[in-house]
Amino acid sequence: MPGQKCHPDSVDVLGQNSETQEMIRLREEAKILDDELNESAGYRFIALLNMVEMDLVGVTWYSDHIKKLIDEQDINELKQQVGTLANYENPGDGSYYDNGGNYAEQPHLTFGTSNYWDVIFSPGLKPSQVLINYSFVGEQGVTYTYNELDKKAEYKIRVTYVLPKESW
């Protein structure tokens, strides 16, 4: 309804603990196996240590973006922003999407290296934002090549840049 705003508490449901008994059981089983691995080989599975904090589906990322939209007054802007959020990885007909956070979803990457980085366990990132494309100083730089573009069409480029400023 026009003029009706989303109640801020409605976003809190995204942050609620939705852990099931089966999830707890599996984590405990994984901990036992990790202890056995450490005992026999002196090795620990580092992801297990961070499993509780891992946001494997991007709940924190979506929640943060939804919270920013709560106070939007312009209904048309709100619709556009919600559409962009809901279709973040779907560029639409005649458009292209290269997911630099997934080896299999960046068909236009022609130069650069992909690798996971140390923020893989940081909340606030979508799963596709923990794999980065990079190149080294002196190299040509990360390059995506699109040979199928229509020279008469207009294109927009949207880049998600998640490297912390202190890493520059």
Image (cartoon, grey):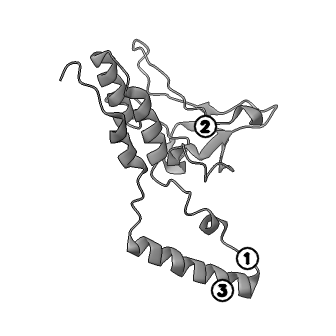
> Circle 3 sits on which residue?
36
Q: Nearer the viewer, residue 83 or 96?
A: 83
118 over 81 or under it: above or below: below
Give the residue type at disc 2.
Thr
Q: Nearer the viewer, residue 135 or 69?
A: 69
x then y, percent, for residue 43: 73, 76
Give the residue type at disc 1.
Tyr
Query: Crowdedness of circle 1 by 10 Å Cα count: few (<14), some, many (20+)?
Result: few
x then y, percent, for residue 71: 38, 23
The image quadrant of residue 66 is top left
Query: Is tag 3's residue or tag 2's residue first in the polypeptide sequence?
Result: 3
- What residue do we see at 70% from left, 74% from top? 44
- What residue do we see at 43% from left, 40% from top? 62
| Contact flag, marks 3 and 2 (Cβ < 8 Å) | no
The CA span between labels 1 and 2 is 36 Å
> Circle 1 sits on which residue?
43
Tell whether 35 sits left or right of 158: right
Query: Is tag 1's residue or tag 2's residue first in the polypeptide sequence?
Result: 1
Q: Is residue 86 visible?
A: yes
Q: How many marks?
A: 3
Numbered disc in front, either 1 or 2: 1
The CA span between labels 3 and 2 is 43 Å
Mark seen at residue 110: 2
- What residue do we see at 36% from left, 20% from top? 72
Furthest residue in direction top, as rendered: 152
Q: Which quadrant of the figure contains the N terminus?
A: top left
The CA span between labels 3 and 1 is 9 Å
x then y, percent, for residue 112: 67, 39
- SS category of the residue bearing label 1: loop
- SS category of the residue bearing label 3: helix
